[in-house]
């Protein structure tokens, strides 16, 4: 049954925010424009649920877009952050926690022997690219259409026509000459990859091993291995952006699952446990190019912030052993199976559900989605209507066809049952 959301306080806050924040928000997807409604303002979360300022409860499958793998306000994480805050929120000097976190990451992620922390994934991507260019003496980058690696000027480039095109700016303010240094290819296209790496002398091939910014689009069999092969044969460095997949799909990220080890790894989200933190890491030989050990400059006043480091360490501790990932896998499978059954029950057949441990996307498409062009061809009006139906029934799903759902350790069978019930009813609405 559809419930009537109380949204008076959200509406008032949005009206005020429009006067002081561009679009009323501090990050575009929060505006909910792609699903045709105004944003909801949140005030608290607990476990697998979130509550807006009008006290409407929702099963939360966004989980702050990925960092909250343990759910909202996990007591161990809250205690760690509280303890750290009582000792000081920032020093601008090294702390023991930074060393502890670097050691923990190095133990988990195959391609990381040494790392440098930043405050955001965008900073980490930008710095990884600078390192790759310094190490290779080259300028050009290769990325894939639909992949988002932060709002770095050179990465805000769209795919053009043909198999391999030089990027054109995807945003005003990005110089054409900067975007032109980026080669954009279709994801899962081996022929385009081989052709581009033969034609261009690349500093780096940059990829999400499990792309989740066009919705979750799995790599085709052998494609990650081909990325590694082409990088090795052409002298480019392979950069894996594991901001989303790192520590989420497995203890060592997507690279551990695939057995394909990049030269540089970009990390974020889970590494900060819900606080602003990210990092990039590689072999010791490569990372020793970073100042002050080497000549590649990068700095940040709040990098390695003690509160974020404490949250990250507490989160990684919760992910030790086999049980957490087994639970996360079971939750993800149950959600995927339930959503598929909900669609069938409602007689709505034009959906594709893609999932892996801790990640899921439901595409409104009659055919499987293997790249960004196919994701763009989805029925976004149907997706928007369905999302509005979920919100009306107390389920908070990503307000974009191009974002992933984020199951957490805090989601229970009851949360899944509520979600499937709401999904079936919302499917019924759009099927009619």
Image (cartoon, rainbow, N blue to C red):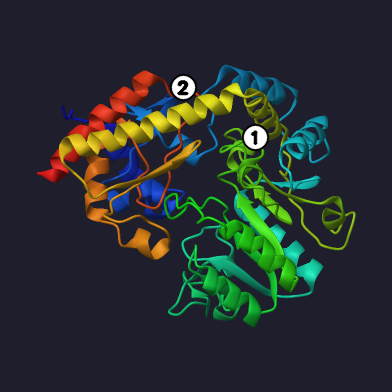
- Residue topped by disc 2: 47
For mark 1, give the secondary structure: loop
Category of crowding for the residue at label 2, using alpha-carbon neighbours closer than 10 angstroms: few (below 14), some (14–19), many (at least 20): many
Q: Position of residue 204 (x, y in %)?
A: 68, 67
In the image, is residue 57 above or below residue 235? above
Q: Residue reaching furthest right?
A: 293
User: Gap between marks 2 and 1, in whole Å?
Assistant: 21 Å
Q: Is residue 141 left or right of residue 350?
A: right
- Residue topped by disc 1: 251
In the image, is residue 389 above or below residue 394? below
Q: Which mark is residue 9?
A: none
Quadrant containing the N terminus in the rendered view: top left
Quadrant containing the C terminus in the rendered view: top left
Q: Nearer the viewer, residue 3 or 318?
A: 318
Q: Is residue 392 left or right of residue 167?
A: left
Q: Position of residue 413 (x, y in %)?
A: 38, 20
To which quarter of the image does residue 366 belong?
bottom left
Q: Nearer the viewer, mark 2 or mark 1?
A: 1
Q: Is residue 54 visible?
A: no
Q: Is residue 405 visible?
A: yes
Residue plotted at (64% across, 38% down) = 271
Q: Earlier in the sequence, mark 2 or mark 1?
A: 2
């Amino acid at each position: 049954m559809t419930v009537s959301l109380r949204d008076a306080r959200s509406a008032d806050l949005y009206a005020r925010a429009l006067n002081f924040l561009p679009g009323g928000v501090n990050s575009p997807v929060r505006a909910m424009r792609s699903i045709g409604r105004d944003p909801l303002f949140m005030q608290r979360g607990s476990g697998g649920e979130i509550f807006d300022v009008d006290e409407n409860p929702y099963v939360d499958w966004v989980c702050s877009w990925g960092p909250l793998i343990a759910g909202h306000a996990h007591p161990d994480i809250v205690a760690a952050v509280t303890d750290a805050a009582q000792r000081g929120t920032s020093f601008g000097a090294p702390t023991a926690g930074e060393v502890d976190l670097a050691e923990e990451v190095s133990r988990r992620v195959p391609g990381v022997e040494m790392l440098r922390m930043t405050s955001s994934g965008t900073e980490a991507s930008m710095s990884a690219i600078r390192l790759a260019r310094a190490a290779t003496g080259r300028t050009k980058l290769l990325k894939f259409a639909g992949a988002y690696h932060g709002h770095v000027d050179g990465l805000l480039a769209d795919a053009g026509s043909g198999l391999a095109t030089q990027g054109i700016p995807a945003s005003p303010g990005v110089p054409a000459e900067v975007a032109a240094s980026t080669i954009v290819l279709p994801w899962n296209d081996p022929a385009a990859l081989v052709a581009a790496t033969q034609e261009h002398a690349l500093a780096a091939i940059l990829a999400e091993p499990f792309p989740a910014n066009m919705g979750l689009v799995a790599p085709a069999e052998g494609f990650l291995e081909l990325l590694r092969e082409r990088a090795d044969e052409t002298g480019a460095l392979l950069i894996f952006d594991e901001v989303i997949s790192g520590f989420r799909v497995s203890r060592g990220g997507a690279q551990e699952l695939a057995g394909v080890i990049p030269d540089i790894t970009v990390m974020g989200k889970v590494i900060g446990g819900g606080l602003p933190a990210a990092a990039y890491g590689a072999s010791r030989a490569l990372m020793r190019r970073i100042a002050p050990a080497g000549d590649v400059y990068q700095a940040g006043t709040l990098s390695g912030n003690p509160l974020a480091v404490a949250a990250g360490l507490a989160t990684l501790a919760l992910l030790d052993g086999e049980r957490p990932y087994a639970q996360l896998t079971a939750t993800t499978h149950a959600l995927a199976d339930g959503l598929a059954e909900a669609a069938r029950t409602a007689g709505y057949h034009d959906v594709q559900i893609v999932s892996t441990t801790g990640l899921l996307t439901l595409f409104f498409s009659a055919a499987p989605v293997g790249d960004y062009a196919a994701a763009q061809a989805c029925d976004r009006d149907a997706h928007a209507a369905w999302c509005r139906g979920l919100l009306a029934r107390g389920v908070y799903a990503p307000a974009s066809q191009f974002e992933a759902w984020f199951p957490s350790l805090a989601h229970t069978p009851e949360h899944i049952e509520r979600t499937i019930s709401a999904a079936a009813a919302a499917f019924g609405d759009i099927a009619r």
